[in-house]
Amino acid sequence: MSEDLIFNLYIFVLATFVGYQVISRVPPLLHTPLMSGTNAISGISLVGSLVAAGSHHDLLSSVLGFVAVTAATINVVGGFMITDRMLRMFKKGPAPSKEKA
């Protein structure tokens, strides 16, 4: 195995461990706001997947790029839908009228 592959694997394992530790310590009440706040960051994966899909290296890279574009798009759209639902939960209804009979 080359040194680059071992180094990249080390970074991947370390990032997975740190990500799990960070997410597992977030209280359940904050999961939805945290996800909606990081939805813009998920757009970066969409841009990266578009670059991978359009690289035209071979058929496999194009197919994997298409799958990545599909998954990233579902992630971003789902995040916006959850954010919209969360914001609608906090919206106040119409104020009651104060008319006296």
Image (cartoon, grey):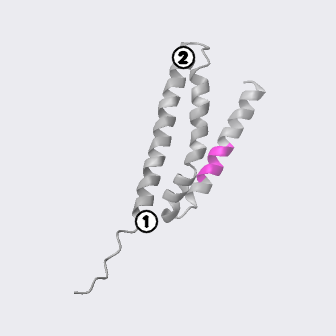
Q: Residue furthest right?
A: 3
Q: Residue furthest left?
A: 101
At x 55%, y 57%, the residue is: 34
Where is residue 84 shown, x and y percent of the image? 44, 53
> Is most of the magenta stretch helix, strand or loop?
helix
In the image, the segment drawn in magenta is 14-20
Corner quadrant of residue 54:
top right
Q: The residue under label 1 is which amino acid type?
A: Phe
At x 54%, y 24%, the residue is: 65
Direction from residue 9 to residue 96 in the image, left or right:
left
Report the front residue among 92 and 55: 92
Report the front residue among 94 and 2: 94
Residue 60, numbered label: 2
At x 52%, y 53%, the residue is: 36
Secondary structure at badge 2 equals helix
| Magenta stretch encompasses residue 17 | yes
First along the sequence among labels 1 and 2 = 2
Where is residue 39 shown, x and y percent of the image? 55, 47
Where is residue 77 shown, x and y percent of the image? 46, 42
Direction from residue 100 to residue 61 in the image, left or right:
right
Q: What's the CA distance linking mark 1 and mark 2?
A: 46 Å
Direction from residue 26 to residue 7 in the image, left or right:
right
Image height check: is 54 above or below 38?
Answer: above
Secondary structure at badge 1 equals loop
Q: The residue under label 2 is which amino acid type?
A: Leu
At x 56%, y 34%, the residue is: 46
Where is residue 68 shown, x and y percent of the image? 52, 30
Residue 90, numbered label: 1
